[in-house]
Amino acid sequence: MDKYNVGILGATGAVGREMLKILRERSFPADELRLLASKRSAGQVIDGHEVKEACAENFEGLDIVLGAAGNNIAAAFAGDIKAAGAVFIDNSSAFRLCPDVPLVVPEINPEDVKKHSGIIANPNCTTTITCTAISALRRLSPIESMVVSSYQAVSGAGSAGPQELFGEMEAMAAGKSYVPRVFAHQIAYNVIPQIGERQFVGYTSEEMKLQNEGRRILHLPEMRVSCTCVRVPVVRSHSVSVQLKTREKLTVDDARAAVAAAPGCKLLDELDDLLYPMPLLSTDQDLVLVGRIREDLTDDRGLLLWCCGDQLRKGAATNAVQIAELLIG
């Protein structure tokens, strides 16, 4: 078996650490694992690997670089990574809407990987979870429109998110005050209906990601999407409510059968037995859990469903490693 030299850019963050974990879990054939981060993080040791400073010379000799850094860092180093001869699988949003950069969920559009010219984009975590859940339905009939509401865990904001949630809960239990630093408002015992900055006609940047990225991944450029993204006091795993309309009417039984057979999905849809997707069930696994599939009483061609997925694994790190597996396959 061939072996590959793999780098992780942004290796000290939550997604970068998860990438390292998943490379090992999936026995990726890596000859060298090179962890790269900021100058101040250089010298740290993670799972036996010393972190090196991200710079042009430290990309030399790598075959694949998994990106777990922010937009500015990804954009700054993309040229150096390509010049070193490596393929950059980037988890930031810097390249997701570039027409010459494939945006890939391996269970949905693996063929798009072949179109890369040095960069492959990893979708937004909520986009990946949602598209994985509905992809099988679009194979039965094209999806014309979709209304989505996401309920996103605090760890989606990084490791500081859970720290703030727990800090607020402890402070409130002790009768003390706590000034939010990560979120705009108190997140303990609260929900915040804004993730990202304000953009197009009142939508936020997080909401626009799902709307724009979903069309590319599903190859449905005419699909109309509206989205509301909400931060909730859950530690890990995002939940998504989906209302969709297909070109032809789909029965609930057909939809359930399609989801049950879909790669990357697990059907949990037994309401009488209290069995349905929940964040606690989807945490620390790679399958997207799908359930509550039912007819839309407002539209004869509509269906509703509920799904949950681990935003650090399938929503980010696992999807990136799966793309790397496609590259070497």
Image: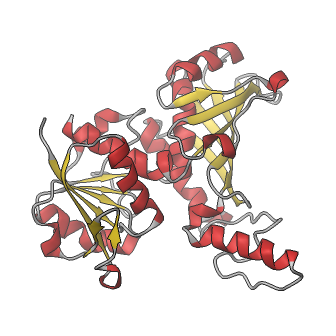
Q: How many marks?
A: 0
Compared to 150, does 114 lie above or below?
above
In the rendered image, residue 212, in percent from the top left (x then y), is placed at 50, 51
Q: Whole-percent x and y of residue 278? A: 70, 41
Q: Residue 185, located in which quarter of the rendered image?
A: bottom right
Res. 85 image quadrant: bottom left
Q: Left or right: 91 with respect to 299?
A: left
Q: Is residue 55 visible?
A: yes
In the image, farthest residue toward the front? 48
Observer-nearest of 20 and 205: 20
Please state if 155 lies on the left or on the right of 300 as rendered.
left
Viewer can see residue 92: no
Relative to 30, does residue 53 appear above or below in the rendering? Answer: below
Name above or below for residue 151 compared with residue 195: above
- Residue shown at the point (76%, 25%) measured from the top left: 294
Q: Is residue 30 left or right of residue 11?
A: left
